[in-house]
Amino acid sequence: MIRKIYLYDKMPEKLEENGIPIIDWKDLPEITRSLNNSFSFYGNYLLNGNNVKKIKKEKYLKAYTENGTYQYFRIKSVKKNLSGISITALHIGYEANRNFIQNAYVANGNGKQIMNALKSNLVLDQPFLYESDVASYHQFTAKQVNPIDAIIGSNNGNQNLASVCDAELDMDNYTLTLKERIGEDNGFRIDFGKNLASIEETVDDSAIVNRLFLVGGVPEDTDYNVEQTPVTFGYLSVSGITEENVQIAKRENSECKTVEELKKWGQSLFDNDRIHEPKVTHEVDMVVLENTLEYQNTYQKIASLRLGDTAYISLKNLDIQVQERMIEYTWYPTLSKYKSVVLGNDLEMYTSSIETQVNSVKKKLETRSEELINAVNNATQWITGNKGGYVLLDPKDAPRRILIMDKPNAADAKKVWQWNVDGLGYSSTGINGPYGLAMTRDGSIVADFVTAGILSGILIQGNVIKSIGSNSFFQSVLSNGAFSIEQYKETNNVDYTNPNWQKDIHGGKVGEFIGTYNGDTKKANGSALINYPGYIFSINQDNGKGLSTPIFQIPSNSTFDNPMYKLFGKGTIYDDIEIKGNLTVNNLKVSGRLETKELYVNGVKIDTNGGGNSGGGDTGWNGQYPPEVTSDRDKRYWQIWAMAIGAGFSKQAAAALLGNAQGESDANPTADESNGAPGFGYGVWQWTDSSGASSGRVYMINLMTRAGVTDNPDTITAQFKLLMWHAPNGQWIATSSYPYSWTQFMTLTDINTATQAFVSNFERPLNGHPERSTWAQEWYDKFVNLEIPSGGSYIAPIASPITVSSEFGWRTSPITGAQEFHNGIDLVNGNPNTPILASADGTVVSAADPGYFDWYGNWTVIKHADGMYTGYAHQSRVDVAVGQNVKQGQQIGLMGTTGPSTGEHCHFQFMDEFYPSSSAHFHNARDYIKF
């Protein structure tokens, strides 16, 4: 699982809140932490990353750490390097050091009391919590010092708190906890066994003491008037000590008044302080170790350790076992893996009072941007043998070749790589060869040797080919999993090895073949041929003489929001085909079913599906409000919210519409900037004629005519439909700051990004509107947890038990056997001539009207307060008249089988207009009533 790193302009009030995901890393980001020392973040971000302009000094990052929590870091430097932008950041806990303690003194207190004293004497109020579990009592003074310096730093020349209490400072975002110990002792055992390059072991046994001469204090009953002799004991030893390995030293403790007390104290030096063990550290490169087969078990054990945890380790050079703790690590937060760890048993260096630890961390961070240079030097050391391995310079004093062997002895080596002036070669039969050429002297890699592993980030350029009869040149490129065709222009001095690439928004690309993924699940779902706007994509038929003619073509003016294609020649459709847009053909022969929005054959429109285009289509609005939405103003915003969700918007993108509607008109569909004067805006989103020729309302109505929106223009419903048509039909223009199409905008999940994308790409004002992001967030918080009512104001038109005998949508006609759009839902309950009931209050607008289509028989239509209409067809009797007001549940007739019908039933419909002009104006009754 890849863990995201998030960016924030400022620290959020809720730490669990996610910011802007930062994913375009050049290298894997790292977190480094040491006991009572550094806790820092480092990353190298792509120069052309999506968020490169947002990454600035003093902003904040959140990353996943080894203990399973997300921690915040404040960016301290952003520097450009050869391959990206290096980012260094300190843990948010160091922000406590912006504060100051003038004087804090505790005469005798435990850790909690001392930490409380530090906090109570701070000059500034900060959100930090000062905690401790140290139970022992100590005297402590912090004077004219910063808080972190007082706890783990120089403490203005005095002993710091961690050293006084023999404790360790843990940082968990805003919580600073002085602990008796970070980590646990779970009995882990690690036996390294061999000296891998991934493990560097340092053993210092110069200070070992395994036999003690102990000196105590003067006994309590001693006469102090004469010279006194303290208690002594010689000698106290650890088991297994011989004359060959003995190391004797004196230790004194004046608090011990008896020999028994002295011996007990001396034994504690062995048992607790482990003075008989050497000072040991193990630096472990986890990346190398992870990929080493014989150390899989060791890796898994080390990977399960946390900062401060104890491990029991057998030293390979000394036949003893030591206790070590993880005192430092470098962690990959995106992969949730260690890069390296340091295990050691000497912790004094981590509580040193010589230098302020915070300054030490800053110095360490400042050097991180030089790591690219260090990496080059490091690689040089590896290849020349300075880092180990079986490397042979032949001959040694004046080498003509470098040999890298699988054995330390050249006579025994079988697998050998050879570097010399002629290139890189490989032999599987020893140093005398024969050698296969893997890389030529000019740096070209021989493809015969690329037989294993994964090529990553590799650009493969094919031969440059000049197109016949033009000045355009092309080459094929395989890069980052995509195969593409790129173009460059001919110049006066054409250099085929260094072509002058055509520079456009696609970097010279004409088209490419790529893998695709599902935008919702982020999972791979197939592959696609991509055509770029301004170019054609064509499948051609060759004539055998170097020329061809198209059969299928995507024209150069096809775009993401307005895709087009052309078919040439004769063709037959043998199976069902569905075409989302318009289709124009000269001759048409179809053996299966053809479904299309508009169909023209020989210039004549064929429209058996009702034709027309209702602009934005079904808005999903059912006129219902949650009980929490009561004011007229909130109802306006709720209607936009419900329609947007119904149209497929994410909740964040829906909130973006609300934030912008508030800035434009306060969501008022009749808001007029200048009472009808030309050149001023009108409506929810303030439609404006940029030419200044007409008023905003006239301009908006003209757009609705083009879009096929027939609703009352002064309603939110009509204007939302217009928005859904207007945006993808020319008004929405993706900008470089927000390079999202309208469809992509509808699925954005960051409120600020969605809001500002709408401002920049749809409204395109002279000045920005950052306040609209705040308003969008407020509406999101208000509506996000409210349920959209499912049309609860409507009831079923017949009594239970109800059976749905035919659903809404396409079906095979029970009358003709042909495919037809069933614009209602058929209901029965087993009772002949059962009463038909009004589904909701309303006014009758049609009652057994014979002027309408005869397939409804006796048809009653009721108009409701929310603008919707319900229809009841095939009645045997109609009990109401046109203009009559009816109540919900009132009987309006009896079920029957009048008109074309195969049996008695109620054909029940929902419509957003009377006498609908197309099937798009019919709605599924299941969206309003649960059957």
Image: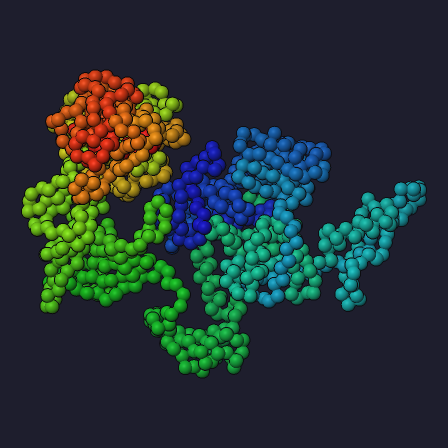
Horizontal side of residue 253 vs 828, given as left or right: right
Q: How is the image coloured?
A: rainbow
Taking the spot 15% from the left edge, 60% from the top edge, the residue there is: 540
Q: Nearer the viewer, residue 75 or 515?
A: 515
Q: How many marks?
A: 0
Taking the spot 51% from the left edge, 73% from the top edge, the residue there is: 390
Q: Nearer the viewer, residue 348 or 874?
A: 874
When asked about the image quadrant of residue 827, the answer is: top left
- Asked if 850 appears above or below 524 in the picture, the reply is above
Taking the spot 30% from the left edge, 27% from the top edge, the residue there is: 798
Tell me where residue 780 appears, x and y as whole percent: 37, 31
Looking at the figure, which quarter contains the C terminus?
top left
Horizontal side of residue 884 vs 65, given as left or right: left
Q: Nearer the viewer, residue 160 or 519?
A: 519
Q: Visible in this render: residue 245? A: yes
Taking the spot 24% from the left edge, 21% from the top edge, the residue there is: 892
Tell me where residue 621 appears, x and y as whole percent: 28, 29
List the single residue furthest toward the top. Answer: 884
Tell me where residue 213 appears, x and y as whole percent: 82, 55
- Asked if 564 appears above or below 641 in the picture, the reply is below
- Asked if 769 appears above or below 593 in the picture, the reply is above
Tell me where residue 762 appears, x and y as whole percent: 24, 35
- Asked if 903 appears above or below 50 in the picture, the reply is above
Q: Visible in this render: residue 658? A: no
